[in-house]
Image (cartoon, rainbow, N blue to C red):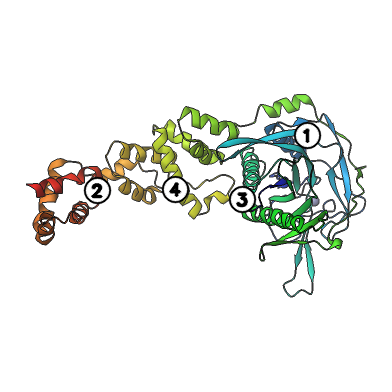
Amino acid sequence: MSELPAGVEAVIGLEVHAELLTRSKIFCSCSAAFGGPANTNVCPVCLGMPGVLPVLNRRVVEFAIRAGLATQCAIAPRSRYARKNYFYPDLPKGYQISMYELPLCTGGHLGVLVDGEVKRIGLTRIHMEEDTGKNIHDAHGDASLVDFNRSGVPLLEIVSEPDMRSVAEAGAYLRTLRSILQYLEICDGNMEEGSFRCDANVSVRPAGSTALGTKVEIKNMNSFRSVEKAIAYEARRQAEAIRHGDRLVQETRLWDAEREETRPMRSKEYAHDYRYFPEPDLLPLVVDPAWVDEIRGTLPELPGPRRERFARDYQLSTYDADVLTQRKDVADYFEAGLAAGAPPKEMANWVMTELLRIVRDEKLDHQLVIRDWPVTPTQLARLVQLVARGAVNRNTAKGLIPRLRGTGRDPEELVAAEGLAQVSDRSALDAAVADVIARHPAQVAEFRSGKERVIGFLVGQVMKSTGGKANPHLVQEPPRAALAR
Ligand SMILES: [Zn+2]
């Protein structure tokens, strides 16, 4: 981390809460959908009424096993739910059903790409738990409301080992983890809507030391950017405190995005002792190894292996292969284009520059799966082929994307119908050149008197007179040759 003084290193562990995309909640049949009018997706179970009993949603366990297998965790044949006790208005039962000493998944790892190198980050555990409701503080400050729609929505808690040493590694870990959950189609990864949340444990120590310094937990970060800024700020603050000989206290701090600093949580805001004990309303969770094998058989090719395959089989740079495989739908789109005959390098180039620009501008990637692509993979593949064989120039091709959108038309047919084919025909070019020379005697005279730069103007005029359709590689020479005569 460049912001830290020389000789000091940061030690970072991340704890992610990922909301699972099941239709119903973890212990009742209420809808787990995001949003909706307040307190409409609720029942006595998720409102924590006395006397009700939780019934486990099998799908939640399946999704947790998917996540565990995709991150090389061991799946415990026997695990157990536990009660985490604390008081807060968004937690109607006074406890959260979570897992504690016997989690479902343990001991995995992720391969994270940082500066072109893959670094392995260990995973301590993955377990299931229920989400809480949401407090809504009235704008006037005289009332606090609670929406219980989120109460009982299934969560995965994914805890990393303190294996990260820089902001870049922490950012890459988070993006990789999100990408894997999205590939598995178990979490939409939307940080702004809170379906992918992250707390960070940060400490600093002399570089090369193996002892751990005093750890601070940071909460309240709701974007990748704020996680990165908060970790950088906190590591600097701790290094500074040590330099001044101040004692650091183990505490929880909140990230203040507005002031860009962390500040201590008031002690009332967190409990010191959750008094965990085994959840008496649920049996221990016994997972049949045959079921685990069955789930293993349904896992898709994951982003890391897919990136390596793209780089190897299509001769792409690691960077390009990474950009193309971060999202499964983008990687699928790219490969569909290749299946339609596009050369890999050109297809990669068009997807990365033109297509992903439109996708980002229109926020199409805010959905888990992009449905409204600007053009189909086959249309883009045809367009790429037209450019590759010189039938249209790149600019004309770019301009065709919005006109092809939603039409299903073949780009070649559109080019023919509208006379957009690139002018590569020598005699047509020569005629355009002769015309430009005839119409600009002053510039021609300047060129002949030695002003080389005027050639740029004349070439531009030739491009203009062909409606931008001239082959840019062919248009450079003719004016020069004509003037030399
Ligand atoms: Zn319910």
Mark seen at residue 305: none
**For mark 2, does the 10 Å Cα neighbourhood hold few (<14), some (14 to 19), or many (20 or more) residues?**
many
Residue type marked 1:
Thr
Q: Please tell me which of labels 2 and 4 falls first in the chain.
A: 4
Discs 2, 4 touching: Cβ within 8 Å: no
Residue type marked 4:
Pro
Q: Please tell me which of labels 2 and 3 falls first in the chain.
A: 3
Discs 1, 4 touching: Cβ within 8 Å: no
Q: How far apart are the alpha carbons under marks 3 and 4?
A: 40 Å
Q: How far apart are the alpha carbons under marks 1 and 4?
A: 42 Å
**Image point (21%, 43%), residue name:** 474
| Whether the residue under disc 1 has CB within 8 Å of ligand 1 | no
Q: Please tell me which of labels 2 and 1 falls first in the chain.
A: 1
Q: How far apart are the alpha carbons under marks 1 and 3?
A: 33 Å
Q: Which residue is mark 4?
A: 374
Q: How far apart are the alpha carbons under marks 2 and 4?
A: 23 Å
Residue type marked 2:
Lys
Q: Which residue is mark 3?
A: 2
Q: Quadrant of residue 103?
A: top right
Q: Which residue is mark 1?
A: 106
Q: Please tell me which of labels 1 and 4 falls first in the chain.
A: 1
Residue type marked 3:
Ser
Q: Residue furthest left?
A: 485
Does residue 431 appear to the left or right of 104 in the view shown? left
Image coordinates of residue 197 in percent, x first then y, are 70, 51
Q: Quadrant of residue 260?
A: bottom right
Mark seen at residue 469: 2
Q: Is residue 40 visible?
A: no
Task: State the residue in front, 183 or 106.
Answer: 106
Observer-side mark, 2 or 4, equals 2
Q: Please tell me which of labels 1 and 3 falls first in the chain.
A: 3
Image coordinates of residue 299 in percent, x first then y, are 64, 31
